[in-house]
Amino acid sequence: GTYELYAGHRRLHAIRDILKEETIACVTKPYTNDAGTRFGEHLDSNLQSREKDIPFWMAEIENALDLIRSDGKKRSIDAEMDEISLMFRKHGLKKGFSKAGIYRYYGLRKLTPELLDTYRYGLEAPTLYKAVNLTEAEQNTLAMQIDEYVKAHAGSSEENIKFPTRLFQSTVDRLVAAREEPQ
């Protein structure tokens, strides 16, 4: 009597909450107790629609870590990142999901929610990763500056505004330089 939705979350939201439909056609599959199989099915079903969704991929890396660690074996973080990279490649993910790419996504958990949310302006994981060593206050300042830039350049819609990667890097550099200046 219980179902797990592993694909179509946005469609479900649109049909149920926006269109106010009472019933929704769906495809059901038998539940498997194998966590690895469920993880793979979830990953496969979201490859296209979540390509640029950094929080989604951060969560998938955490899910993969939970899966890897569930056997109780001790591994180095380096070995865990290798395993995640292999898991992702098995499902067709290549670009951005090398071991180094996985490390970058994993490192993004050090960002404030305000800064992490700026991915919606076209900032990719390698760019955002450049800010992981900023203090919380510096990250929030950076997020505020990004929001101000977007509002100044957006006109009536913020949807398609991209924050320039070079401007991100130069702003990070300025914040670090300001921190290191003697008071």
Image: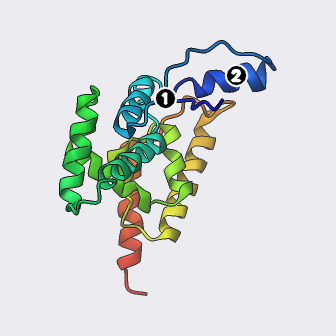
Vertical relation: 72 (above or below) 127: below
Asked if marks 2 and 1 touch (Cβ < 8 Å), the reply is: no
User: In the rendered structure, which amino acid carries the disc numbered 2?
Assistant: Ala
Numbered mark located on residue 31 in the image: 1
User: In the rendered structure, which amino acid carries the disc numbered 1?
Assistant: Tyr
Residue in the image at 57% along x and 23% along y:
8
Residue in the image at 57% along x and 42% along y:
150
From the viewer's side, name the closer residue of 138 and 100: 100
Q: Is residue 169 visible?
A: no
The alpha-carbon separation of the residues under discs 2 and 1 comes to 25 Å
Nearer-N-terminus badge (2/1):
2
Q: Residue furthest top?
A: 25
Vertical relation: 6 (above or below) 75: above
Q: Which residue is mark 2?
A: 14
Would residue 178 be found to the left or right of residue 156 on screen? left
| Quarter residue 158 falls in | top right
Residue in the image at 66% along x and 32% along y:
155
Residue in the image at 51% along x and 39% along y:
121
